[in-house]
Amino acid sequence: MRPLTEPESPAPSYPDHWEADIVLRDGGTARLRPITAADADRLVSFFERVSEESKYYRFFAPYPRLSARDVHRFTHHDYVDRVGLAATVGGEFIATVRYDRIDERGRAASGDADSAEVAFLVEDAHQGRGLASSLLEHIAACARERGIRRFAAEVLPANNKMIKVFTDAGYSQRRSFADGSVHLTLDLEPTAASLEVMQAREQRAEARSVGRLLAPASVAVVGVGRRPGGAGRTVVERLREGGFTGTVHAVNNALPEDATELGGAPAHRRIADIPEPVDLAVLAVPADQLPGVVGECGEHGVRGLVVLATEHSAERQRSLVQLARAHGMRLIGPGAFGIINTDPAVRLNASPGPYLPRRGPIGLFTQSAAIGIAVLEELDQCGAGLSDFVSAGDRADVSGNDLLQHWYEDEHTSVALMYLESLGNPRKFTRLARRAALAGRPVVVVRGGRHSGGAPPRGHTVPVGHTPHATVSALLRQAGVVEAETVTDLVDTGLLLARQPLPPGDRVAVVGNAESLGLVAHDACRAHHLEPLPPRGLGPAARPEDFRAAVAEALADAGCDAVLVTAIPTVTEDSTAGPGRAEHVAALSEALRAAVADAGVGKPVLVAHLALDGLATELATHGIPAYPSAERAVRALGQAARHAGWVRTAGDSGRVPEFDDLDAPVATAVLNAALVGRPAPRGPADAAAGAVELPAADTQALLGAYGITVVPTLPAPDEDAARLAARRLGYPVALKTTAPHLRHRPDLGGVRLGLSSEEELVRAYTELAGQLGDPADLLPVVQPMAARGVDTVVRASTDPLTGAVLSFGLAGPASELLGDMAHRLLPVTDRGASELIRSIGAAPMLFGWRGAQPVDTAALEELLTRLGRLLDDHPQIAAVDLEPVVVASRGVHVLGAAVRAAPPPPRSGYGPRRLPTY
């Protein structure tokens, strides 16, 4: 790839939005940034570390050193026609990439030329870490932003690694061979294949980065006191007591010269004094010491950090994360409780927690330390085991998304439990959770702060979207996330999903020895949309073998999908705990185990019991969850049944309909005209800036381009204007006010329908003004009458974090007050539209409720899919409000429409891989 000459240009503006932190293939991190004129010495030093072979591959000839002209050329860019990026660790270059705009003959060009030559150089010690692939993604994004549509590259045939980087990227490409080199041309428009490649690489890299944190061979605890007590000393003791299989080092900068040990671990004054590599450092130092300690860890080559200290300053959090990532480290915290890995080959308890939990299939992530402690204790009391646990505190770096990447490929984790106080990237979270659920690893989430106005807790630096929490819940359900209401619900549901198969349906057999407890279970089933079968009462004197027979019979019943066992002490037992009670508990546990084992069917069995101490622990050894109340057991079963229903249908999400009458160029022209002069936002924080509401004519043109017709509306500021409007539209007409305080409130008398003559119109106009006020305030309009039907509302909005969401409900204050709206993420498929209109509580109104004529739901579904296509094709649309939409027996009629447009931020998921910065 021979260097090009380029003309001089004025000093350009530095594009700081191109800076990014990335995770590499081995789980380490690097910093990407544009190369500047101040990087001359770094570039020379980097070039000297590169082998002669790598230089030959880059320049097609021996190139032992860079000349002064080379250094100037490779460090001076205009960031339009000539761009250079560097990957750095610890401030030093480890890889570079550059593009130069070229014309059709391969000469340096500018202006309208849409091709560029691209070239890479990776330091040999860092080859194989995925640097070139990441650099290609980022330089391609820079090029697209500057109007470049394709890359050209010349590669020597022997440079197989570089050829593979290009061919594996997923872009459309062409290849030829001439003059002893391979000539590659890549079209830079993202394709389904390139997006899939990026997501697969992202998954592997982020999973590996978490895996490095959870399975260290050596741990250093910084800030270990000389006396018992204190977080650092406690962590050292927990590591040793838990049987950590690696080495532990204690660090105390005030350590006496003659001290060699702290808490039973080798002691050092500085982390630099540790005579071996350190994989993980747990920082138990005050917040003001963190920057210095993080820098020392980076210099020593530490691979990951757990920060126990709390740091509420968002700016200082960002500085810590930048410092850690600059040295190739991931960071858990600040304010973390710690991390746990129960793998027998690791046995890591890097937390103040009192013991290493038993091994099991549950992965746990929490932001709150207190919630983490509570869940760990609850799981232990239930006899449940963990695969691993991360308490991330303010999660300034490592987040729940990273853990989902890890658990997706962890064969020892079958269910993920998560307590989240904020969702930094909801769109990515739902994508990862959906993929995990489809792979048989359900994700159970309880969200803190759902009713606190949406503000994250103090110290959390994540961006906050504007999507209401009820909408977020609907989107989580759409992605297959099991959302729990409480922490207790989180544990209960997790136990069932981890230990038992999903129910094939919602029919529940209740088997027990207490009629009253069975009735409670029956009512609870109804409340959670389960179908209780006729009770199978065993009587108060039932023996364990009676339970075994009844459970076996229920499991063998083809009309039964799950079995709930309700148990209380039998009347023949001693009323106080003793040997007899313990023997009965053991016998009952064994009977239930045998019944499940003998049946061998994929149906869940769970137990609700009262006053049978020890039964939950006994059953846990057999994988049967037990609950201290029927309500808790049924709630967990209801969650499992809903998730099972999602799994059964998730593989067939429908198709996005194709329409022959869409006119995308017209829609684009309308939006471009509305947004002239409004700059694109740099990110989610200012995505709403510059939004504009389209005039009525533009709104009608935009919607009409996608086959959505808005019933014409003419203003009627006075009686004469009303008469003229009615003549133009034709009788019968409707007269309505559009004043904000009366709009969409027909119950307040602001609407007059079925006006069939001029006399009726004038009378209605006079009444309207007399009852409600001055026409100048009422803003009356005239519309032609639409067919009678059911009034509905269709809305769509784009949140920079959540993405575009389509919402549907019946029009009117009742639905709005009750929150009876359904929501769907784009794109909207035919099946998605059908489910959307059927998922509101008032859906029977559409299907002939109480003898009314059913309405045209097929036309309504078509409207929803057309609107979904409009938003999916045009991210400039910030919001659409169609109200009311009258669904008649034949067709739909959009009586009101409003559209807001704004320059869109870059689409999440379409850009290069990068770690979030908050």
Image: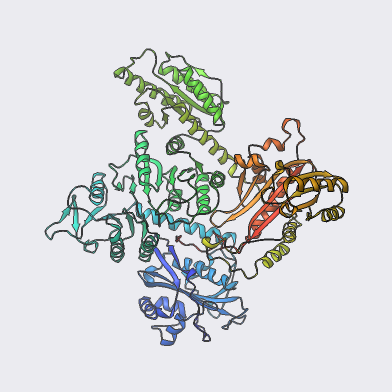
Question: How many numbered marks have been drawn onto this rendered protein structure?
Answer: 0
Decide if residue 507 is in sight here: no
Colour convention of the picture: rainbow
Where is residue 402 drawn, in percent x and y?
A: 43, 53
Image position of 484 with respect to 397: above or below = above
Where is residue 339 drawn, in percent x and y?
A: 34, 49
Image position of 699 with respect to 54: above or below = above
User: On the picture, is 731 further left or further right than 848?
Assistant: right
In which quarter of the view is residue 48 placed? bottom left
In which quarter of the view is residue 675 placed? bottom right
Camera-side residue of 477 and 191 = 477
User: On the picture, is 423 further left or further right than 287?
Assistant: right
Camera-side residue of 62 and 537 = 537
Camera-side residue of 628 and 673 = 673
Q: Quadrant of the C terminus?
A: bottom left
Decide if residue 571 is in sight here: yes
In which quarter of the view is residue 123 placed? bottom left
Where is residue 101 drawn, in percent x and y?
A: 56, 79
Where is residue 486 drawn, in percent x and y?
A: 45, 38
User: On the picture, is 478 further left or further right than 718?
Assistant: left
Of all residues, the one furthest to the left in this rendering is 258
The residue under the point 57% across, 26% down is: 558
Camera-side residue of 179 and 743 = 743
Image position of 884 with respect to 16: above or below = above
